[in-house]
């Protein structure tokens, strides 16, 4: 077990976004978080990454409680994320975007960079090499010097995932990675995520609406509705579950007219 | 171990060599008035590139320069004036004994000016960078006012509104130009390192920068303190150039002028900050002919003091209309030589 949420509750004023949710993600698992709009999926991500403080409950990562740590510290422990709407650094090149992921793994001080001391050159060369390796892995090395936002949508997604992988994570949180993609691109992305899981020894936690994508990719899913867990198990069983169908489509058993 | 010099490094070396040659040329052959303008350009280059670091590169809207420049100027002035000279000119109140004892040579005076400003900036960072948004602008604006009021109301230290006079004139083109070159070099080294990348990341999207493990508080503090350091040094150079300083020199207009420079040059571009300095500081002098009576042959205009500021404002408006991002945008000199790439 690598990530464990215990009775996590998040309230925004009077609204309960997440209501006492408990789940655990095993190492190397691809775990899906699904649910209708407003179910609290992104809130869950924000709690895991430390952007929000949980009102109650705890988040355990690698046997340590992380929900009181600062967001940038949690990233350094090995939790990386991407965003629902792609958020690349829009004035920077593709490689600079990825190099930001290496920021805390680059070992030279401020003064060493001002006076261009030897360690600066060595470290820059090392991380640039590693950044190019990651870009190469995603097949976007040829765009390294291009402005990140000049790339196509699918390529920008890849840059975002590459940037998250640059932080050397143990667990990768993907917020709707397949949003806005056509079926061919979705298929390619699913293969890429599975391959990256194996090659980078990752655990993946993802939010997705595309059920086909979830079915192809996820080992396990958790279905949330209004902040409550309504199902946990295999994705194939989730779409047959009565509660899940009700949450998505409404209840047809009672005649409400 | 052989040292390989790349093409862009050759260009940089050529620029530095040309600047050094020009500095020698100017201080040997040019008249005093021109040298004075060049000195001003050099000092304002230091101030503009450092102000650009916090405002343009790190994207934290700040209005601090006049405060830190004032501190730098006063520290340098107090360290350069000897005890007798100080005792002689403190008319409002007798100076504190420790003020009379302060003494250092020019290099140390400049260094202490920078360090003192940077330490003050550090103490401001803790409250200010805990929150996001335009608080920095408000706090630094207030800071500038406070420094000025303190300078006026503590005559035992600063000689109040009379200011400090007869400061030894140490600044010359070699000092100002030399430190300007070093500042630009240092700032560009920061911008082209992981710290510069992180500053740009904070400017572009702070939440995402945090999500990449960047300690944004630390990065913002670094940018702010570096700016303050160089503004302190610049203030010291200014004091040793003008030979007399008073609180009225460091009003908000001082900051405003620097803001014009970096916005005109292009926020975030160090090259732009240098070009902006030359245009604003040099151009303001060059346009002095507009204030004088002019003879167009068929009609004559009377002297119109302030006419150059009107023309200057019109130029600024035109730049903002047609080049929204300033002259350089976010580009640097080296980007201009890059071949245009197509996807």
Image (spheres, rainbow, N blue to C red):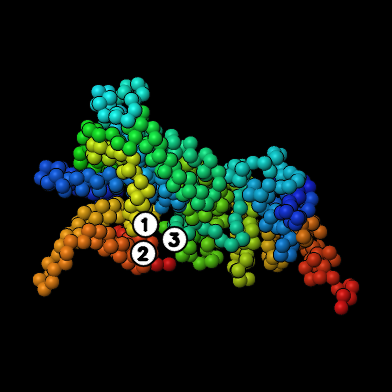
Asked whether the beta carbons under mark 3 and mark 2 sit within 8 Å of each other, the answer is: no
Total marks drawn? 3
Task: Give the CA distance from mark 3 to mark 2.
Answer: 24 Å
The 10 Å Cα crowd at callout 2, few under 14, some 14 to 19, many 20 or more, is some
Q: Secondary structure at mark 3?
A: loop
**Residue B181 position by quadrant:** top left
The 10 Å Cα crowd at callout 1, few under 14, some 14 to 19, many 20 or more, is many
Task: Give the CA distance from mark 1 to mark 2.
Answer: 9 Å
Disc marking residue A147: 3
Q: Which residue is mark 2?
A: B320
| Residue at image location 44% in from the left, 39% down from the top | B121
Q: Quadrant of the C terminus of chain A?
A: bottom right
Q: Nearer the viewer, mark 3 or mark 1?
A: 1
Q: Nearer the viewer, mark 3 or mark 2?
A: 2
Give the percent coordinates (x, y) of residue A55: 73, 47
| Residue at image location 14% in from the left, 42% down from the top | B27
The 10 Å Cα crowd at callout 3, few under 14, some 14 to 19, many 20 or more, is some
Asked whether the beta carbons under mark 1 and mark 2 sit within 8 Å of each other, the answer is: yes
């Amino acid at each position: 077990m690598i990530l464990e949420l215990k009775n996590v509750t998040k309230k925004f004023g009077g609204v309960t976004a997440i209501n006492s949710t408990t789940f655990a993600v095993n190492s190397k698992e691809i775990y899906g978080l699904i649910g209708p709009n407003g179910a609290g999926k992104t809130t869950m991500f924000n709690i895991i990454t430390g952007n929000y403080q949980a009102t109650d409950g705890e988040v355990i990562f690698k046997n340590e409680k992380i929900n009181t740590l600062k967001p940038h510290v949690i990233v350094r422990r090995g939790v990386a994320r991407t965003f629902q709407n792609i958020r690349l650094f829009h004035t920077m090149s593709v490689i600079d975007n990825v190099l930001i992921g290496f920021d805390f793994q680059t070992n030279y001080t401020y003064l060493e960079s001002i006076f261009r001391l030897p360690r600066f050159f060595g470290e820059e060369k090392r991380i640039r090499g590693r950044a190019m390796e990651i870009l190469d892995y995603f097949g976007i090395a040829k765009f390294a010097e291009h402005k990140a936002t000049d790339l196509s949508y699918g390529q920008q997604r890849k840059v975002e995932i590459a940037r998250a992988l640059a932080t050397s994570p143990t667990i990768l949180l993907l917020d709707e990675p397949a949003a806005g993609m056509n079926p061919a691109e979705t298929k390619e992305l699913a293969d890429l995520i599975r391959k990256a899981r194996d090659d980078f020894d990752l655990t993946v936690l993802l939010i997705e609406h595309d059920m086909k994508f979830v079915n192809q990719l996820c080992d396990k899913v958790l279905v949330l509705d209004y902040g409550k867990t309504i199902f946990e198990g295999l994705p194939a069983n989730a779409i047959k579950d009565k509660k899940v169908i009700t949450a998505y489509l409404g209840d047809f058993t009672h005649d409400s007219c | 171990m052989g040292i390989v010099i790349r093409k862009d490094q050759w260009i940089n070396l050529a620029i530095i060599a040309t600047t050094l040659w020009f500095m020698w040329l100017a201080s040997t052959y040019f008249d005093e008035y021109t040298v004075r303008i060049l000195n001003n350009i050099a000092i304002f280059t230091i101030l503009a590139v450092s102000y650009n670091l916090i405002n343009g590169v790190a994207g934290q809207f700040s209005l601090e320069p006049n405060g830190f420049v004032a501190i730098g100027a006063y520290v340098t002035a107090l360290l350069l004036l000897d005890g007798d000279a100080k005792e002689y000119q403190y008319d409002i109140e007798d100076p504190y004994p420790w003020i009379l004892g302060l003494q250092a040579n020019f290099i140390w005076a400049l260094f202490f000016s920078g360090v003192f400003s940077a330490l003050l900036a550090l103490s401001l960072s803790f409250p200010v960078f805990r929150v996001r948004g335009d608080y920095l602008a408000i706090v630094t604006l207030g800071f500038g006012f406070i420094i000025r009021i303190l300078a006026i109301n503590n005559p035992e230290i600063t000689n109040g509104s009379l200011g400090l006079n007869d400061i030894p004139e140490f600044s010359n083109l070699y000092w100002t130009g030399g430190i300007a070159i070093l500042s630009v070099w240092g700032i560009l080294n920061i911008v082209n390192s992981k710290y510069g990348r992180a500053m740009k990341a904070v400017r572009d999207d702070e939440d995402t920068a945090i999500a990449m493990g960047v300690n944004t508080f630390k990065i913002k503090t670094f940018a702010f303190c570096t700016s303050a350091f160089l503004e302190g040094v610049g203030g010291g150079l200014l004091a040793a150039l003008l030979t007399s300083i008073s609180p009225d020199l460091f009003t908000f207009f001082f900051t405003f002028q620097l803001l014009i420079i970096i916005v005109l040059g292009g926020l975030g571009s160090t090259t732009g900050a240098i070009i902006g300095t030359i245009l604003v500081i040099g151009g303001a002098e060059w346009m002095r002919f507009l204030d004088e009576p002019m003879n167009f042959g068929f009609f004559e205009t009377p002297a119109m003091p302030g006419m150059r500021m009107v023309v200057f404002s019109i130029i600024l408006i035109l730049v903002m209309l047609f080049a929204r991002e300033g002259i350089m945008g976010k580009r640097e000199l080296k980007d201009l030589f890059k071949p245009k790439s197509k996807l």
